[in-house]
Amino acid sequence: MPETVQKTLFRSLPGIYRREEEDGFTYRLLGLFAGVLEDLEDKVYGLHRQVNPAEAEARLLPWLASWVALLLDETWEESKRRELIRRMVVLYTVRGTVEGIREFVEIYTGIKPEIVEESGAGWRIGVKSTIGKDAKVFGTWEENAHRFSVLVKTFDEFDLERREKIRGRVLIEKPAHTELVHVGWFASYWQIGVRSTAGVDMKVGG
């Protein structure tokens, strides 16, 4: 049987203090200190769990997040906050990229989004596109460069609060020179004004 803290303390004393053995005053006095030390010992033994995002107490998550220079949104679900802390170091390596934005949105929504860049690959009028038929000119390349939208494919419509949380996270993670135009969702079919936005996540051709 493992030795108790009280007995360990008693056995560590010089022999002159152990004359009374375990039925004396000194042994009973050590019991006061043993109770405190046992509580501390339990905390030390469990310390490795408190630095693991998957096992740490919820109240310690902001402290853990500070290790990776992350300010948590306390309104996020606890499981998403834990996942973000766990993956944050790797996410820093792709921060400010399309893939990095996808990863952040996927953690929050559970779905990897589409990032639509408005500059596109350009048209070849008369070869692949016909103005007035399957193409319209909305602005110059310079006006649309560095503009993008984030679209999540799901049948569950996002409420305004959820959409704003995604937008806020993307605004933090995007490169400073880019402009976030739209955060939305779409299903496998279109419904103008409800599930699709013409010119943002869909185009109508001939």
Image (cartoon, grey):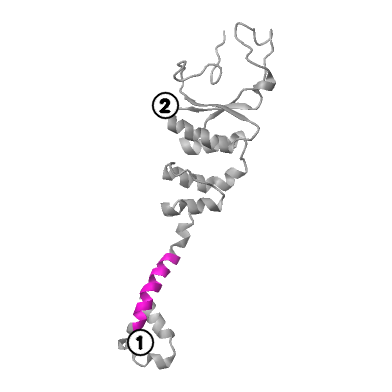
Q: Quadrant of residue 177?
A: top right
Three-letter amino acid code at the position of disc 2: Glu
Which secondary structure dominates the residues rendered in magenta? helix
**Vertical order, 110 against 182 (above or below):** below
Can you give x and y, in whole percent of width and height, for residue 43 in the image?
42, 65
- Residue 3 is at least partly visible in this image: no
Image marks 1 and 2: residues in contact by CB distance under 8 Å: no
Can you give x and y, in whole percent of width and height, for residue 94 in the image?
62, 40
Which residue reaches farthest left? 23
Q: Quadrant of the C terminus?
A: top right
Pointer 2 residue: 157
Disc assigned to residue 11? none
**Vertical order, 35 against 86 (above or below):** below
Q: Quadrant of residue 16?
A: bottom left
Left or right relative to 138: residue 51: left
Left or right relative to 205: residue 6: left
Task: Please tell me which of labels 1 and 2 falls first in the chain.
Answer: 1
Can you give x and y, in whole percent of width and height, for residue 67 in the image?
55, 53
Give neighbour class at mark 2: few <14, some 14-19, many 20+ (Cα, 10 Å).
Answer: some
**Vertical order, 91 against 112 (above or below):** below
Can you give x and y, in whole percent of width and height, for residue 29 in the image?
34, 83
Q: Residue at x 52, y 35 (%)?
A: 168
Which residue reaches farthest top? 132
Disc assigned to residue 26? 1
SS class, disc 1? helix
Q: Which residues are magenta?
A: 29-44
SS class, disc 2? loop
